[in-house]
C-alpha cells in the first residue's frame, strides 16, 4: 500500500476519535459549556493539553528547522518563558478569577472604559487570526504534500478541509471538548517527537547516550550567545521570551480561556506551574531533534531542500521524515503534525468565537437561548472561513519568499499585534491613572506604527536589529502614549 493511503487511513481514524470525544463532551452543552466548560475542568488535563496548544505545528516543524541558522539559541527564549509564566500565575490569573471573567478583555472595560475594552478585544482577534493562520498554513502545506496532493487535491481544497475538520468537532462543545481533545493531541505530539528522535538514532546505530553526546558535540547545540549586536544575544532573547509568554498566554483569550475552566484559582495556578516545567523540557527535545536532522543529513550525504543556494529550513523535517527516515518515522511525523496543529488551531477557533460573541455581540445579554446558539454557529462558521482565506494569502506570500522561517514571522507578528495589549494592561495594573477612553484606539494603532519606524531607524543608524523583542518596544511606546492621554486618579476624565 502506498504511503499516502496509509496516512489517509491514520488521519480518518484520528478524526473519528476526536469526533467521538466531541459527541460525548458536548451532551447538554450550553453557552457556558462552550466558553468556560462550566468551570469544571481538572487542572492536570488543562496543563497537559496546553502544551500542544502552545507549541503548535509551527514548533513541530519550524523550530527543528531553525537549528541550522540559530543553533539552540531559541532555548534562551524558552528560559525567558519561565519569568513570563511566573507573572501570569501570580498576578494575572488571580485577577481574572477574582473578577469572574469569561472574556479577559472585560477587565479593560472595568478599569478604563468601553473603547479600551473594544480595542483590547480587537487586537486579540487580529493577533490570534494572524497567528493561527500562520500555524495552520505550515501544517496544511505538509498535509498537502504528504497526503492530499498525491490524491489529486489542490492546496485551496486542503486548506478548506483542514478547517472543516476542526469545525466538525468543536462547534457543539467548544472549550469543554477542546480540553479533552487537546489532552489527546498533546500525548500524540510528544509521543511523535520522542519516537522520531529514537528512530533517527536507530537509523544512525546510536545508543541514547551516544545520541546525546553527538548532539552536545555539534556546533549546532550552542545555547548562549553573548555578542551584543547578534540577534541571538542572550539578554534580548530572554527578555523577548518573558514578554512573549506574558502576552501570548497571559493576555491571550485563547490560552487563558483554558485556565478559566479550572475549578479554582489554586488549581489554575497548579496547572500553570506544571505546564511551564513540561513545556521547557519539550522545547529542548525539539531543538535536539533539529540538530539530529542536520547531523543525519551530513552523515548520509543527503541534499536538503534549497532555493537560490539557501536551505529552506521549514521543509527540512518534512522532507527527511517523509522521504528518508522510513515509514515508521513518516507515520509518527504525520501524527505529530496533525496533533500539534489541531491542538492549537481548535482552541484558537473557539477563542475567536468566544471573544467576538462576548466582546462584540454581547451574547450574555441575549435571553433567547436558541438565538444564542444561532449566533455561536454563525460566528464559528465565519471565523472558519476567515482562517481559510488567511491560509491561502500566506501561501502566496511564502511563494514569494520561500526561505522565510515561519516561527520567526509568528513572533514578529505577535510583537505588532500583542504590543498594544501589553501597553494597556501595564498601565492598568501598575498605575491608578484614569484614561481618556475615546482616544485609546488611536494610541494603540499609532504604537505599532511608531515601533516599526523606530526599529528601522535603530537598525540603520545604531546597527541594533529588533527581532522577537519588538513586542517590548511597541509595549513601551503604547504605554507612554496611553500615559499621555491619562490623568491622575483624582482628576475626572472627559470622554
Image (tube, helix red, strand yellow):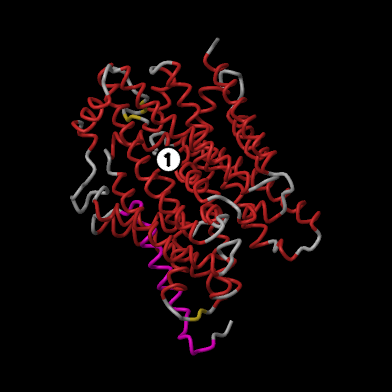
> Horizontal placement of 297 versus 58: left or right?
left
Q: Residue at x 47, y 73 (%)?
A: 428
Residue 412 against residue 68 in the figure, above or below = below
Residue drawn at 25 percent across, 19 percent down: 299
Q: Position of residue 417 (x, y in %)?
A: 48, 57
Where residue 311 appears, x then y in whole percent?
Answer: 33, 29
Rendering coords of residue 26 (x, y %) = 70, 44
The front one of 472 and 12 is 12
Question: Magenta residues, as a range?
Answer: 466-492
Instruction: Identify the residue at image location x=39%, y=62%.
Output: 87
> In the rendered image, which quarter contains the C terminus?
bottom right
**Can you tell which quarter of the image residue 203 is in?**
top left
Q: In the rendered image, which residue does mark 1 sit on? A: 406
Q: Is residue 476 magenta?
A: yes
- Which residue is depicted at the point 24% across and 36% down? 221
Residue 265 versus residue 464: which sits nearer the camera? 265
Amino acid at each position: 500500500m502506498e504511503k499516502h493511503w496509509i496516512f489517509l487511513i491514520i488521519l480518518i481514524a484520528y478524526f473519528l476519535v476526536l469526533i467521538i470525544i466531541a459527541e460525548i463532551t458536548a451532551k447538554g452543552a450550553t453557552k457556558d459549556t462552550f466558553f468556560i466548560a462550566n468551570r469544571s475542568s481538572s487542572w492536570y488535563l488543562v496543563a497537559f493539553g496546553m502544551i500542544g496548544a502552545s507549541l503548535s505545528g509551527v514548533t513541530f516543524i519550524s523550530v527543528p528547522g531553525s537549528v541550522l541558522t540559530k543553533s539552540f539559541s531559541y532555548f534562551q527564549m524558552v528560559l525567558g518563558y519561565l519569568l513570563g509564566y511566573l507573572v501570569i500565575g501570580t498576578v494575572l490569573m488571580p485577577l481574572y478569577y477574582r473578577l469572574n471573567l469569561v472574556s479577559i478583555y472585560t477587565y479593560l472595560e472595568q478599569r478604563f472604559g468601553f473603547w479600551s475594552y473594544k480595542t483590547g478585544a480587537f487586537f486579540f482577534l487580529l493577533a490570534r487570526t494572524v497567528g493561527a493562520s500562520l500555524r495552520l498554513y505550515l501544517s496544511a502545506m505538509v498535509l498537502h504534500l504528504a497526503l492530499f496532493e498525491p490524491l489529486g487535491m489542490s492546496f485551496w481544497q486542503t486548506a478548506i478541509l483542514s478547517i472543516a475538520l476542526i469545525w466538525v468537532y468543536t462547534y457543539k462543545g467548544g472549550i469543554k471538548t477542546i480540553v479533552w481533545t487537546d489532552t489527546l493531541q498533546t500525548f500524540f505530539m510528544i509521543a511523535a517527537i520522542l519516537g522520531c528522535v529514537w528512530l533517527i538514532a536507530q537509523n544512525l546505530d546510536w545508543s541514547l547516550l551516544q545520541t546525546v553526546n553527538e548532539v552536545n558535540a555539534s556546533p549546532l547545540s550552542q545555547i548562549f550567545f553573548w555578542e551584543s549586536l547578534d540577534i541571538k544575544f542572550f539578554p534580548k532573547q530572554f527578555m523577548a521570551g518573558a514578554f512573549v509568554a506574558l502576552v501570548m498566554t497571559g493576555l491571550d483569550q485563547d490560552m487563558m480561556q483554558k485556565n478559566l475552566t479550572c475549578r479554582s484559582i489554586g488549581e489554575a495556578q497548579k496547572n500553570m506551574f506544571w505546564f511551564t516545567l513540561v513545556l521547557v523540557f519539550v522545547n529542548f527535545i525539539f531543538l535536539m531533534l533539529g540538530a539530529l536532522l542536520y547531523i543525519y543529513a551530513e552523515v548520509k550525504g543527503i541534499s536538503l531542500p534549497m532555493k537560490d543556494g539557501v536551505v529552506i529550513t521549514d521543509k527540512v523535517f518534512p522532507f527527511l521524515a517523509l522521504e528518508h527516515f522510513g515509514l515508521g518515522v513518516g507515520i509518527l511525523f504525520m501524527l505529530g503534525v496533525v496533533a500539534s496543529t489541531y491542538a492549537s488551531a481548535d482552541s484558537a477557533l473557539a477563542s475567536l468565537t468566544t471573544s467576538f460573541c462576548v466582546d462584540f455581540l454581547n451574547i450574555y445579554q441575549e435571553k433567547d437561548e436558541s438565538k444564542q446558539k444561532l449566533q455561536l454557529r454563525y460566528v464559528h462558521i465565519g471565523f472558519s472561513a476567515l482562517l481559510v482565506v488567511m491560509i491561502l494569502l500566506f501561501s502566496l506570500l511564502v511563494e514569494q519568499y520561500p526561505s522565510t522561517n515561519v516561527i520567526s514571522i509568528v513572533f514578529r507578528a505577535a510583537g505588532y499585534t500583542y504590543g498594544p495589549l501589553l501597553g494597556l494592561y501595564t498601565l492598568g495594573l501598575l498605575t491608578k491613572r484614569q484614561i481618556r477612553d475615546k482616544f485609546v484606539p488611536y494610541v494603540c494603532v499609532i504604537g505599532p506604527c511608531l515601533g516599526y519606524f523606530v526599529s528601522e531607524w535603530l537598525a540603520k543608524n545604531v546597527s541594533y536589529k529588533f527581532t522577537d523583542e519588538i513586542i517590548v518596544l511597541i509595549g513601551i511606546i503604547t504605554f507612554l502614549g496611553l500615559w499621555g492621554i491619562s490623568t491622575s486618579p483624582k482628576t475626572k476624565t472627559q470622554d
